Image: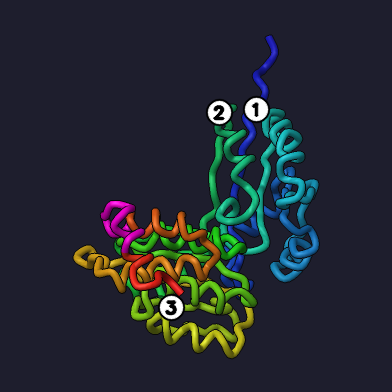
Amino acid sequence: MSSAEPDGVLVLAATPIGRVADAPPRLVDELATAEVIAAEDTRRLKRLTGELGVTPTGRVVSYFEGNEQARTPALLDELLAGRRVLLVTDAGMPSVSDPGYRLVAAAVEHDILVTAVPGPSAVLTALAVSGLPVDRFCFEGFLPRKAGERGRRLAALASEERTMVFFEAPHRTETALAAMRDAFGEDRPAAVCRELTKTHEEVRRGPLGELVAWAAEGVRGEVTIVVSGASPTAAMDTDPASLRAAVAALEQDGTSRKEAIVEVARRAGLPKREVYDAVHRDGGVA
């Protein structure tokens, strides 16, 4: 009677977002013993293992956004064959705005054990140091690059009461903050967390209007933005001037006037016709 094939294990391992000393001790053990290591960037993995003083014994393969879909079946086969597969990304927890979700979903579908090595997370670190409410929050990842899509995403979040966490590229930080200011108001409290846990770590706190001015001078490094949620008692002003301003803000971000009117009507809880009339009163939006 043949013995059953041993069960494979998928291990998602958090890697340092800044200082190598923040690496969890279990990461060293997993890197040394995993039979297969799927890495977002094999060069960064080599640098990390060198700094940690560990020599992987398993096979190393690349697993990044460009090949994630194509490579998932082969990694699933490794798991089905009973091997221990370690998944690491460049920084933080795999699958959180990084490769990993497809492999996790495939493993779960085939009843393969999925576990994790907890550790550094830019999302939770930024939230904790922001000084903003942490009892309820949501992670929104990266905003769309196109102005219209970005404006619509933020408009849909204008009434979100939970603290919001975003990732952003340094060269787009000013644009993102300006779009947030237009959607949430210039007085909405926020924090820009730059180079978290690194030598030049900086947390800039203040209302969105001030942060836009600060970012205009240039931002460098990895950026995480934390924005306070909307006040549960705050209601959108529904006077004609406020409605026109809200539509104009969305149009400025690339939203068509028709779509902007629909969105403002939704946020204000008004009929579309009322917003339409306000926009086109006295010459309409400039």
Q: Residues within 10 Å of mark 2 (few under 14, many from 20)?
A: few
Residue at disc 1, secondary structure: loop
Tell me whether the residue at label 3 lies in contact with that at label 2, contact meaning CB atoms closer than 8 angstroms.
no
Residue at disc 3, secondary structure: strand
Provide the residue designation for mark 2: 111
Instruction: Inspect this view and state whether residue 248 appears.
Output: yes
| Magenta-drawn stretch contains 272 | yes
Q: What amino acid is found at the position of numbered circle 1 in the picture?
A: Pro
Judged from this view, the residue extending furthest toward the top is 1
Q: What amino acid is found at the position of numbered circle 2 in the picture?
A: Asp
- Total numbered badges shown on the rendered structure: 3
Q: Earlier in the sequence, mark 2 or mark 1?
A: 1
Q: Earlier in the sequence, mark 3 or mark 2?
A: 2
* Residue drawn at x 49%, y 75% as measured from the top left: 177
* Residue drawn at x 62%, y 47% as measured from the top left: 100
Specify the segment rendered in magenta.
266-277
Q: Earlier in the sequence, mark 1 or mark 3?
A: 1
Examine the image and state in which quarter residue 245 appears.
Answer: bottom left
Across and down, in percent, residue 1 comes to: 68, 9
Above or below, comparing residue 219 to residue 66 in the picture? below
Above or below, comparing residue 92 to residue 82 in the picture? below
Provide the residue designation for mark 3: 191
- Secondary structure, magenta segment, majority class: helix
Front residue of this view, candidates 25 and 136:
136
Across and down, in percent, residue 286 comes to: 46, 75
Across and down, in percent, residue 70 comes to: 76, 39
Across and down, in percent, residue 153 comes to: 47, 58
Front residue of this view, candidates 75 and 248:
248
Provide the residue designation for mark 1: 6
Front residue of this view, candidates 147 and 209:
147
